[in-house]
Image (spheres, rainbow, N blue to C red):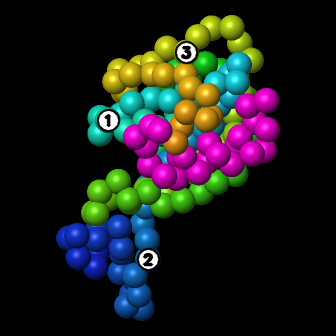
């Protein structure tokens, strides 16, 4: 049976030696370049987020991300390398480890969004700082832009 440090910190699990360790869900996200723009999705907290989702047991991160992008945007993408990782404090009692990958879509079909989100926008990287979104996503987009990902 797992013992957590406190009800407010369910992500810190006690081990037999008395020390605590993070037990976090893993979420993989993509900074996707399509015609110099980036698809973003509005979630239930009215934040903009990158496409992607939670890693399922037995699933490798790149396959998870390809599946999530197909489900959320209707796109088959090429997933590149992971390039940014951070711990997102969704709420004080809920943390998620986020790994962000570079991805590209070369098709002609515009993205469509699934029932999981409220809205979809395509933005230029320079528009991201003005949007309501977690700082980790902003950092990932800025790093991708600095690498020439949207050129």
Question: Do callouts 2 and 1 mark residues in contact (Cβ within 8 Å)?
Answer: no
Instruction: Point out the frontmost of discs 2 and 1.
Output: 1
Front residue of 20 and 73 = 73
Distance from Cα at disc 1 to Cα at disc 3 = 19 Å
Magenta span includes 149 = yes
Measured as percent of width and height from the top left, residue 77 is found at 68, 25
Measured as percent of width and height from the top left, residue 135 is found at 48, 52
Question: Do callouts 3 and 2 mark residues in contact (Cβ within 8 Å)?
Answer: no
From the image, tell me which residue sits under label 3: 111
Distance from Cα at disc 3 to Cα at disc 2 = 39 Å
* 63 to 20, vertically: above or below: above
Q: Quadrant of residue 107?
A: top right
Determine which of the numbered discs, if any, sits on residue 21 in the image: 2
At 43% from the left and 43% from the top, the residue drawn is 133
* 136 to 129, vertically: above or below: below
Does residue 122 appear to the left or right of 21 in the view shown? right
Label 1 crowd bin: few (<14), some (14–19), many (20+), radius 10 Å: few
Magenta span includes 143 = yes
At 55% from the left and 22% from the top, the residue drawn is 122
Front residue of 33 and 116 = 33
At 42% from the left and 66% from the top, the residue drawn is 23
Q: Regarding mark 3 in the picture, which secondary structure is present there?
A: loop
Front residue of 107 and 22 = 107
Magenta-colored span: 130-151
Badge 3 or badge 2: first in the primary sequence: 2
Measured as percent of width and height from the top left, residue 118 is found at 34, 24
From the image, tell me which residue sits under label 1: 46
Distance from Cα at disc 2 to Cα at disc 1 = 31 Å
Q: Regarding mark 2 in the picture, which secondary structure is present there?
A: strand
Label 2 crowd bin: few (<14), some (14–19), many (20+), radius 10 Å: few
């Amino acid at each position: 049976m797992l013992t957590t440090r406190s009800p407010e910190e369910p992500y810190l699990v006690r081990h037999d030696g008395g020390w605590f360790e993070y037990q976090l869900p893993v979420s993989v996200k993509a900074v996707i370049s399509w015609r110099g723009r980036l698809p973003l999705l509005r979630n239930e907290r009215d934040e903009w987020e990158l496409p992607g989702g939670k890693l399922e047991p037995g699933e490798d991160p790149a396959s998870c991300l390809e599946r999530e992008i197909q489900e959320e945007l209707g796109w088959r993408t090429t997933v590149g390398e992971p390039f940014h990782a951070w711990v997102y404090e969704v709420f004080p009692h809920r943390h998620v480890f986020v790994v962000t990958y570079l991805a590209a879509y070369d098709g002609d079909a515009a993205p469509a969004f699934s029932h999981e989100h409220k809205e979809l926008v395509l933005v230029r990287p320079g528009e991201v700082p003005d949007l309501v979104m977690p700082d980790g996503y902003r950092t990932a987009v800025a790093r991708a832009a600095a690498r020439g990902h949207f050129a």
